[in-house]
């Protein structure tokens, strides 16, 4: 049974609970709670225990409590939550893995009928097939321009029809037809829209990133920094390896064109003076390949001889 008291007492109790949660947890999932019923919310609360706590409330109350608590404690990180408290949202405080908690939240979705005036979160498509409705119901289909035919005394939809587009409001005819067909096109539940983690607020899509994605983005960033540094002749840690390589190339070019030399340049000069040494270096590899070819041919000949002898004795493997 909920707490029964005056509005002021309820606000004080709510403020106390929110402050305690802010002090205890460093991770918060901000979730949109449109069209989520109390029974559904109760199931979510039970499913997320004991590592997570769900807190719903008015945005003004949440913002006020967070702002006052941030001023009292001097922890301004809490204020990063304020811009995310827009619309019908709730807070889920958790100590568990953020990705696992989000996946657990997504399990608690329930089907819902298309009500008149509701904004469609997805496209609603009526599939083809027998509807089970008698021919007197064809007026619903005619109003919505749905191609039908009468088959064995019932109405049959000939082709799939996109009845409601995403973002459009459901009309009375669409709602009535979907109800007659027994189609519950929508499903509702808590949807994670933002995540707060130790003062940082980010989109839930960040949780879908793998280590390979992070390494790829990091490598791309390092490459960009190195390119800009080299173009501006501004030294950075990312550009140091490239600077050393370019410097070595310049020294090597000078050594080749002049009498100046150093140990690493000697080998290059030697190759340039006698290009045939390239062929000598590649010779062992080619000789190995040529030696391997006759060996393979011999093996094939032995296999063929063995097969022929088997055939002669009447033991052919392919009979």
Image (tube, helix red, strand yellow):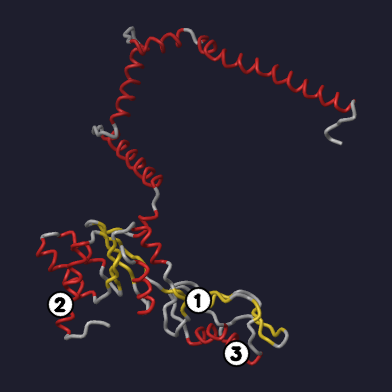
Q: Position of residue 204 (x, y in %)?
A: 35, 60
Nearest-to-viewer mark from 2 and 1: 2
Secondary element under disc 2, as helix, strand or loop, is helix
Q: Residues within 10 Å of mark 1 (few under 14, many from 20)?
A: some
Nearest-to-viewer mark from 2 and 3: 2
136 with respect to 28 (left or right): right
Circle nearer the N terminus (2, 3): 2
Secondary element under disc 3, as helix, strand or loop, is helix
Residue 242 lies in quadrant: top left
Q: Position of residue 264 (x, y in %)?
A: 36, 13
Task: Report the residue marked by disc 1.
Answer: 185
Circle nearer the N terminus (2, 1): 2
Count of labels in the image: 3
Q: Nearer the viewer, residue 23 or 127?
A: 23
Task: Report the residue marked by disc 3.
Answer: 139
Task: Report the residue marked by disc 2.
Answer: 12
Q: Nearer the viewer, residue 283 or 7?
A: 7
Q: Residues within 10 Å of mark 3 (few under 14, many from 20)?
A: few
């Amino acid at each position: 049974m909920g707490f029964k008291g005056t509005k002021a007492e309820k606000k004080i109790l709510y403020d106390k609970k929110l402050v305690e949660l802010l002090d205890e947890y460093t991770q918060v999932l901000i979730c949109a709670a449109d069209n989520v019923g109390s029974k559904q919310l109760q199931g979510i609360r039970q499913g997320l225990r004991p590592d997570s706590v769900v807190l719903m409330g008015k945005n003004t109350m949440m913002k006020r409590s967070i702002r006052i608590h941030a001023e009292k404690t001097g922890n301004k990180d809490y204020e990063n939550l304020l811009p995310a408290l827009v619309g019908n949202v709730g807070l889920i405080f958790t100590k568990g893995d953020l990705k696992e908690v989000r996946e657990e939240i997504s399990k608690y979705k329930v089907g819902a009928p298309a009500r008149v005036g509701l904004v469609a979160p997805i496209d609603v498509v009526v599939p083809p097939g027998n509807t089970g409705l008698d021919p007197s119901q064809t007026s619903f289909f005619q109003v919505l321009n749905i191609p039908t035919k009468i088959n064995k005394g019932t109405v049959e939809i000939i082709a799939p029809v996109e009845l409601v587009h995403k973002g459009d409001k459901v009309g009375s005819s669409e709602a009535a037809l979907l109800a007659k067909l027994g189609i519950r096109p929508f499903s509702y539940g808590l949807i994670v829209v933002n995540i707060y983690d130790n003062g940082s607020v980010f989109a839930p899509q960040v949780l879908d990133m793998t280590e390979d994605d992070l390494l790829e983005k990091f490598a791309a960033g390092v490459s960009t920094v190195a390119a800009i540094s080299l173009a501006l002749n501004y030294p950075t840690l990312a550009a140091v390896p490239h600077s050393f390589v370019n410097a070595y190339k310049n020294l090597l070019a000078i050594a080749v064109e002049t009498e100046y030399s150093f140990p690493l340049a000697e080998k290059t000069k030697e190759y340039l003076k006698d290009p045939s040494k390239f062929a000598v270096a590649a010779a062992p590899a080619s000789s190995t390949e040529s030696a391997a070819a006759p060996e393979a041919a011999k093996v094939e000949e032995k296999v063929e001889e063995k097969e022929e002898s088997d055939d002669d004795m009447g033991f052919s493997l392919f009979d």
